[in-house]
Amino acid sequence: ARDECGSLREQCNILEEKLSFTEASLEQEKKS
């Protein structure tokens, strides 16, 4: 169970990185 939790946390971190990257891209599009 602990390993499952660890991989889920890792996936969550990856998703958060993708989300913040997407938000940054949207902000740049608004400025241009």
Image: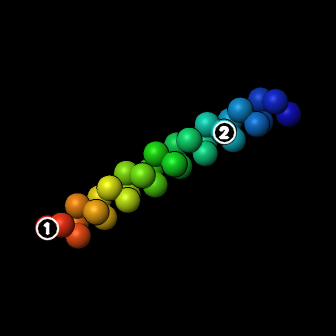
Above/below status of 16 relative to 25: above
Above/below status of 2 relative to 12: above
Q: Which residue is the site of mark 1?
A: 32
Q: CA distance from mark 1 to mark 2?
A: 35 Å
Label disc, if present, on residue 14 of the rendered structure: none
Report x, y in % for residue 27: 28, 63
Above/below status of 7 relative to 23: above
Which of labels 1 and 2 is toward the front? 1
Amino acid type of disc 1?
A: Ser
Q: Estimate how packed mark 2 is, as few (under 14), some (14 to 19) or many (20 or more) residues with alpha carbons within 10 Å.
A: few
SS category of the residue bearing label 2: helix
Q: Residue furthest right?
A: 1
Q: Residue furthest left?
A: 32
Q: Is residue 23 left or right of residue 8?
A: left
Report x, y in % for residue 9: 66, 39
The one nearer the camera, 8 or 27, is 27
Q: Is residue 32 left or right of residue 3?
A: left
Q: Is residue 2 left or right of residue 7?
A: right
Q: Which residue is the site of mark 2?
A: 9
Rendering quarter of residue 24? bottom left
